[in-house]
Image (cartoon, rainbow, N blue to C red):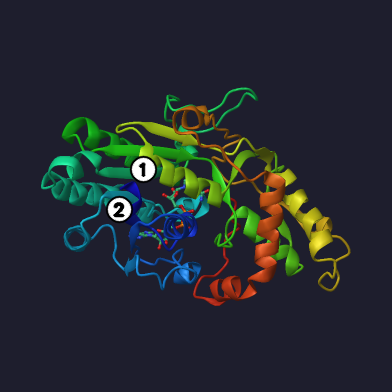
Amino acid sequence: TDNRKTILVTGGAGFIGSAVVRHIIQHTECFVVNVDKLTYAGNLKSLVDISDSERYAFEQVDICDQSELIRIFGDYQPDAVMHLAAESHVDRSIDGPSTFIQTNIVGTYTLLEAARSYWNLLQGERRTSFRFHHISTDEVFGDLHGTEDLFTETTPYAPSSPYSASKAGSDHLVRAWYRTYGLPVVVTNCSNNYGPYHFPEKLIPLIILNALAGKPLPVYGMGNQVRDWLYVEDHARALYKVVSQGNVGETYNIGGHNEKQNIEVVRSICELLEELAPVKPAGVTKYHDLITYVTDRPGHDLRYAIDASKIASELGWSPQESFESGLRKTVQWYMDNKEWWQAVLNGSYAMERLGQG
Ligand code: NAD
């Protein structure tokens, strides 16, 4: 049955990948093999809740390594691939695009080829039911300038940053492998995620941790950029739905119906902290006073918003977490899990850039 499958997850030590692995181990009977290179963004501590499971295996492998991928497909005989491994931070892609081209484009190509040669040898029901699920972003659509439009599955691609261009390239490759070779693919494009285990270079955790440390809260430009926020566990649930029930060759947009300006998000975090962390660092009267406007990111997209009605009507998925309750849980999680983020901050990674993914 669907519930007993072997799923090869790439990037399972990352923010969304770890939520997907936790979701599958905790809510299904499936076996997961996690293929992750463990870059600066990969953290096995995000998987401690499930890493003892007999239905979990870890392979530290680069998705650009063709022979290792072929070995893994042979060893584990997966029924599906969920491909989340990527370089994911826009500011890093502006500083140094090369690893983005390598992992997001060459890595996706290498994984597609390994999957195709494996799939070609499958027969009968296993061959028909095999899925290659490519996980992507709404940033491939560029930005919206009106206030009414939403990105749909047929919005033309117009990526702005090296990150989103490399993800757009990978989406095109995946669709071409379906059209040209018949590889049974599904693609999802999702809006901004937030929640526990989010690497502290991204907007929400950066603001929480800087505020708790009494450091400035950097906001790009006027802070009027609009993002559609989705709680990461809602995304993980959507992804499992798509890989197990989605129609071959289809694309599904995933979003939270939660459009917020960046400055609104920062203010909401400050308000939550006033309530949850009333004892402030020395010299801080109100968390709001720490907000600091900084020069905008080049090419910064103004607005993203997703029309997620197709996945709602075809697969019956909709977000469960409201932004208010999800943000509260997230702030509380960072307050309760200092060990997790202190280890990240003390690592080799230096917080040299302001992060607002
Ligand atoms: P992340 O940066 O937190 O995690 C990426 C993971 O991939 C890390 O564990 C890293 O070690 C691994 N990785 C990187 N390069 C690799 C390589 N060459 N080989 C093997 N593993 C490698 O990213 P995330 O935020 O969890 O995003 C996961 C996916 O979802 C990405 O494809 C991203 O484009 C997409 N996405 C993210 C968001 C978001 O808001 N974070 C929204 C929509 C889509």
Q: Secondary structure at mark 1?
A: helix
Ligand 1's image quarter is: bottom left
How far apart marks 1 and 2 lie (CA) works out to 10 Å
Mark 1 Cβ and ligand 1 under 8 Å apart: no
Q: Badge 2, how many Cα within 10 Å: few under 14, some, many 20+?
A: some
Q: Residue at x 74, y 54 (%)?
A: 269
Look at mark 2 in the image and give the residue it sits on: 5
Picture quadrant where residue 315 is located: top left
Q: How far from the left and from the top, in percent, is residue 305?
A: 58, 33
On the question of residue 13 being in view, the answer is: yes
Q: Residues within 10 Å of mark 1 (few under 14, many from 20)?
A: some
Under circle 2, the secondary element is: loop
Residue at position x 55%, y 45% in the image: 192
| Residue 62 horizontal/vertical position (percent) | 29, 62
On whether ligand 1 comes within 8 Å of the CB at mark 2, the answer is no
Q: Disc 1 designates what residue?
A: 244
Left of 241 or right of it: where is 130? left
